[in-house]
Amino acid sequence: MGWFDFSRAPAGAAVETARIPLFPLDTVLFPGGLLSLKIFEQRYLDMAAACLKDGSPFGVCLIAEGGEVGAPAVPHPVGTLAAIETWEMEQLGILLVAARGGRRFRILESTIGAGNLLEAKVELLADPPATPFPGDRQRLLPLLMRIVAEAGRERVPEPHRFDDASWAGYRITEVLPIQNLAKLKLLELDDPLARLEVLERFLDQRKLLG
């Protein structure tokens, strides 16, 4: 089945799992978001080459312990799949990559593979059902539209789904001036309406909404 497979949860519900390389970073990637990377460590150069060859994703997780460079970092358990969309090697040994966030996942088990590359078996978290942007959160829309306009299409490419609660919540959270741990908590929320509620409360307290 390629890089993913299906197993069974104890209750009998289907669980979609995947075996992926991990790229722990000091950032949080959201579904649909864009991530620009400058890759120079050999383990990640090899990872990117394998992903491009196989058309497979890698996993981005916020670092819990350690750093981006050197010994393998300890990642937080929930992250986001990243698919390489464009790449360029500006000079030998330095790869510039633009990756797009896909589905969220939870790490089930991890190992350190060849070249100190962290690898994991992950559970792919279900996408929430399409949820229309709620009428009682309309105060968030002008802010979201300003975010998208100021970022430009390169950072927030079309389609712009202003009527989708998940898409809107992810795009607002990406640019919030808050700690990465707080962004991770918002990523972990399964309910897009709950995410919008938290965002509105936060922004309202800081008088950032009209």
Image (cartoon, rainbow, N blue to C red):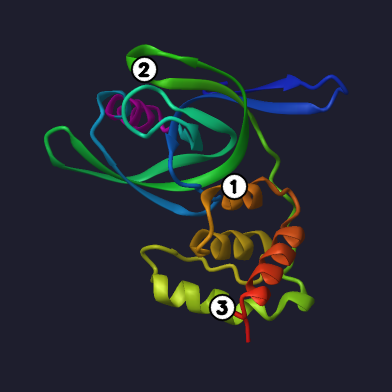
- Callout 3 crowding tier (Cα within 10 Å): few <14, some 14–19, many ≥20: some
Which residue has dot 3 on it? 143
Magenta stretch encompasses residue 50: yes
Residue 57 percent across, percent down from the top left: 46, 34
- Residue 184 circle label: 1
Question: Given the current orientation, which residue lies at the most extreme top position?
Answer: 114
Mark 2 or mark 1, which has the lower sequence index?
Answer: 2
Pinpoint residue 131: horizontal percent, then vertical percent.
75, 61
Q: Residue at x 50, y 15 (%)?
A: 111
In terms of secondary structure, what is the magenta stretch mainly?
A: helix
Label for residue 116? 2
Question: Cβ–Cβ below 8 Å for labels 1 and 3?
Answer: no
Q: CA distance from mark 3 to mark 2?
A: 42 Å
- Answer few, some or many: residues within 10 Å of disc 1's Cα (few below 14, many 20 plus, some between 14 and 19): many
Camera-side residue of 201 and 125: 201
Q: Is residue 109 left or right of residue 126?
A: left
Quarter in which the N terminus is drawn:
top right
For badge 1, the amino acid type reads Leu
Report the front residue among 41 and 85: 41
Give residue 142's quadrant in the image: bottom right
| Mark 1 or mark 3: whose residue is earlier in sequence | 3
Q: Residue at x 54, y 45 (%)?
A: 102
Magenta stretch bounds: 45-55
The reply to whether discs 3 and 2 touch (Cβ–Cβ < 8 Å) is no
Q: Amino acid at mark 2?
A: Asn
Considering only vertical position in the picture, is 135 above or below 113?
below
* Label 3 SS: helix
Q: Give the x, y percent position of residue 16.
A: 68, 28
